[in-house]
Image (spheres, helix red, strand yellow):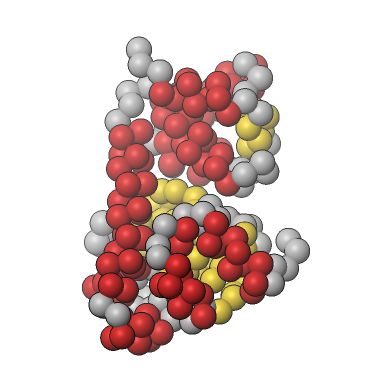
Amino acid sequence: MQKISKVESEKIASSSGWLALVPSKFRADLLRHSTLIQLKKGDVLFRVGDPPGGIYGLVAGTVSISLAPSDHAPRLMVLGIPGHWTGEACFLTRKPRRGEVRAVLDTTMLHVPLDALDRMAAKDPSVSHHVAQILMMSVETLLQVVYDLQKPQADRRIASVLQRTIRIGDVPLPLTQGELGIMANASRKQVNATLKQFKEAGWLTHTYRSITISDVNALRGYAEAEE
């Protein structure tokens, strides 16, 4: 992946997701406190139980986000896309990390340390409100995940995962069939049969470790159809 400059990263982060929704003064202040970090494929940003830290904004690449209730091993829930921010819970609760974030591809992120957020909040109480918006956006995403998992048909659950994840962009989705099965609560047999069905319909092509969507609208329509 070609390296992205700090200036370019700030432009990308400001154009979508959470940072595009906050007041311009707060956005500028936050970016002044941010640093650029690079992750190689497979690098772990943080794990469950790690000490409290700052927030991270995805600029380029993809990260996997694995979550679980307390005392359970985290499971893959979603893939982060450019514009996605994570890590806000530590600022709001002062408790250790509750999830695991890992680079699925070479990835560029912006990092705002916890102490920088504290200094900003000491000057402006509305900072906590703005950071809490990240949490609410995460809740909306997880509500969609729960809703999709309640669909009784495995093929529609699989279609739902794929159409959510396609927002990564016009690149192959870095998902193995096993990972897709975890995200859709589907067996390997169900995943294999569904991918074959979607391939024959002309909606996608796939290898064992990646999936390329060719007809997003058809896939989305199938995911949302009611029987």
> For the point 24% across and 61% down, which residue is it?
70
Extreme residue toward the top, this view: 227
Tell me: residue 102, above or below residue 162. Answer: below
Q: Position of residue 109 (x, y in %)?
A: 56, 68
Is 108 on the left or on the right of 65, as rendered?
right
Q: Position of residue 24 (x, y in %)?
A: 45, 67
Residue 210 visible? The answer is: no
Total number of numbered discs in the rendering: 0
Residue 2 visible? The answer is: yes
Q: Nearer the viewer, residue 83 or 68?
A: 83
> For the point 75% across and 64% down, which residue is it?
2
Tell me: residue 38, above or below residue 41. Answer: below
> For the point 30% across and 31% down, which residue is it?
150
**The C terminus sits in image quarter:** top left
Residue 129 in which image quadrant = bottom left
Tell me: residue 43, above or below residue 164. Answer: below
Q: Position of residue 200 (x, y in %)?
A: 65, 17
Q: Position of residue 93 (x, y in %)?
A: 24, 73
> For the point 38% across and 22% down, which residue is it?
153
Q: Nearer the viewer, residue 182 or 39?
A: 39
Residue 211 in which image quadrant = top right
Tell me: residue 150, above or below residue 15. Answer: above
**The N terminus sits in image quarter:** bottom right
